[in-house]
Image (tube, rainbow, N blue to C red):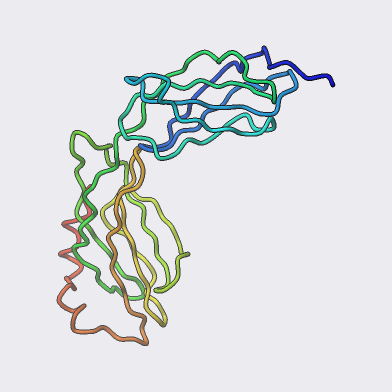
Amino acid sequence: MFMFPAPTEQPKRVDVKVRSATEVTVIWQQVIQQIDGYEIRYWPANEKDVTANRVQVSNQNFSVRLENLKPDTRYAVRVFSFNSAGFSPPSSQVYFTTQKAPPRQKPKITSYVKSGSKYIITWDHVRSDSNESDVKGYKVLYRPDGQYNGTLVTTGKHYIEVPAPVKGQYVVEVRVHSDGGDGEVAQVKIPGAASGISSNYLGFLLPIIGILAYLEF
């Protein structure tokens, strides 16, 4: 019975797109020879390649996402093609460095004030440490309490206006956005018109004039 030999053509044009502190995408050019798939080997560049993690994909895939990487770490990566007889020679070795981790500090919500048919939510600016990614802005999710889906907005400001709920309670979640990824969530719950405003919320309400002090980035 005829057996195909191990592939002799190595994957070429390997490139890496760094997505965050823990994720990258590796892409390469398709191999022309008949193969079963590709194997991606990657490891911290200050270690030996014998410690490499390995991921295999089918011959129809020319990219793979690598996850759970270490933040701010230089890695080496090689791509092989393979079939039942073995592996091809390795691709050229490519290096990449993951982003610094996102800031650990979550935004501190300082007030949420009802103004007509809207709520104005403000928070303090988050400052990243030297070992953390710079703050690019904030992601704000506005959703009904008890549900996961809602309206997602990205802003560079320290405040946002959201519609006052007609009924039921809504949640506003604020988190840092950075090249390293998204930070931890701070949240506040705002009641619908039918719910009224409890005494616990009244202590947080500030005049609109007081809000203006927070509007500078």
Q: Quadrant of the N terminus?
A: top right
108 with respect to 161 (left or right)? left
Q: In the image shown, does 174 or 28 lie closer to the viewer?
A: 28
- Residue at x 34% of width, y 32% of height: 99
Q: Is residue 214 above or below residue 87?
A: below
Q: Is residue 65 above or below residue 146?
A: above
Q: Is residue 28 above or below residue 169?
A: above
15 with respect to 176 (left or right)? right
- Residue at x 24% of width, y 37% of height: 132
16 with respect to 12 (left or right)? left
Horizontal and vertical percent position of residue 120:
29, 66
- Residue at x 29% of width, y 39% of height: 101
Horizontal and vertical percent position of residue 19:
43, 36
Q: In the image shown, does 118 or 103 lie closer to the viewer?
A: 103
117 with respect to 210 (left or right)? right
Horizontal and vertical percent position of residue 25:
50, 32
Looking at the image, how many numbered discs can be counted on the residues?
A: 0
- Residue at x 37% of width, y 78% of height: 169
- Residue 210, by quadrant, is bottom left
**As drawn, which residue projects farthest toward the front?**
1
Q: In the image shown, does 53 or 182 lie closer to the viewer?
A: 53
Horizontal and vertical percent position of residue 126:
21, 48
Q: In the image shown, does 205 or 76 lie closer to the viewer?
A: 76
- Residue 98, by quadrant, is top left
**As drawn, which residue projects farthest toward the right?**
1
